[in-house]
Amino acid sequence: MDMELKPLFATPVVKLHLPETEMLKQKFAPEMLRRYRAGQYNPPAIWETDRIHTSFGAASKDQVISPLPAAYEKLLGQFVRSERYGLALWHNVYWDGQEYQEKHHHIPGHISFIHFLLFDNAEHKAPIFYDPARTTKAYCRHPALPPEFSSEAAKIDVAEGDVLVFPSWLEHHVPPGNYTKPRITVSMNITLPTPGF
Ligand SMILES: [Fe+2]
């Protein structure tokens, strides 16, 4: 019997490769690693993890990446057709401290980006994304049914230079790893004004 799986209402996650990655890495990674060793940032108090090195929440003047590089501006412009938007940009280093980030979303952003600036897929772990319908799907989960009917988490394999673009409501987490090499991501949230304002 011919069968075809038709995934309705699929969550849009775009993966692309940023050609300017090497240039951005050369320019910013050394200072990011210096700040990691110096323990320069503290994670926000409401986050569960205290094993993460993130510049999230730091003022723009205290970010390694500021002002916005042209490569990122061009990237954002491919997805956001608006002259006005709010931008939050921060970086994260996961290295030899078993760093991780618990399940979270990027609301009140509208669209979010993760750029894998320094990433070795031989040892670094990709983020795990979670289906927003997972609690509803849990009612119908059963080992006698095909797993596609109740899958709730998914991983997208990434390589250095890749960017994942996703709606900010999409929950995800970064698993812990004890890495020999640093893993650096740059995250961006775009927040758009209410239409008409
Ligand atoms: Fe995130």
Image (tube, rainbow, N blue to C red):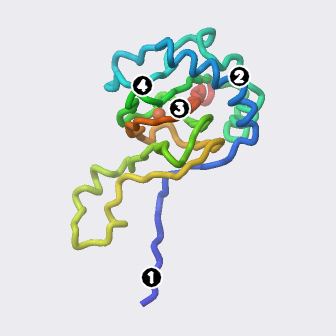
Which structural element holds mark 4?
loop
Position of residue 43 relative to residue 127, above or below, is above
Q: Give the quadrant of the N terminus.
A: bottom left
What residue is shown at x 62% (from left), y 35% (from top)?
117
Q: Say if disc 2 is inside 8 Å of ligand 1.
A: no
Q: What amino acid type is highlighted by mark number 1?
A: Met
Mark 1 or mark 4: whose residue is earlier in sequence: 1
Task: Determine crowd level at label 3: few under 14, some 14-19, many 20+ residues with C-alpha closer than 10 A.
Answer: some
Q: What amino acid type is highlighted by mark number 2?
A: Leu
Q: Position of residue 159 (x, y in %)?
A: 60, 47
Kindly check if marks 4 and 2 are in contact, taking CB atoms under 8 A apart as contact: no
In 3D space, how far apart are the residues under numbered discs 1 and 4 (Cα atoms)?
45 Å
Q: Position of residue 54 (x, y in %)?
A: 48, 22
Using the image, tell me which numbered label, if any, was put on residue 3.
1
Which residue lies under the disc numbered 4? 52
Which residue lies under the disc numbered 2? 68
Instruction: Identify the image quadrant of residue 105.
Output: top left
Position of residue 62 relative to residue 112, above or below, is above
Which structural element holds mark 3?
loop
Which residue lies under the disc numbered 3? 182
In 3D space, how far apart are the residues under numbered discs 2 and 1 (Cα atoms)?
48 Å
What residue is shown at x 73% (from left), y 36% (from top)?
22
Q: Position of residue 9 (x, y in %)?
A: 47, 58
Mark 2 or mark 1: whose residue is earlier in sequence: 1
Residue mark closest to the camera, 3 vs 1: 3
Which structural element holds mark 1?
loop
What residue is shown at x 35% (from left), y 16% (from top)?
45
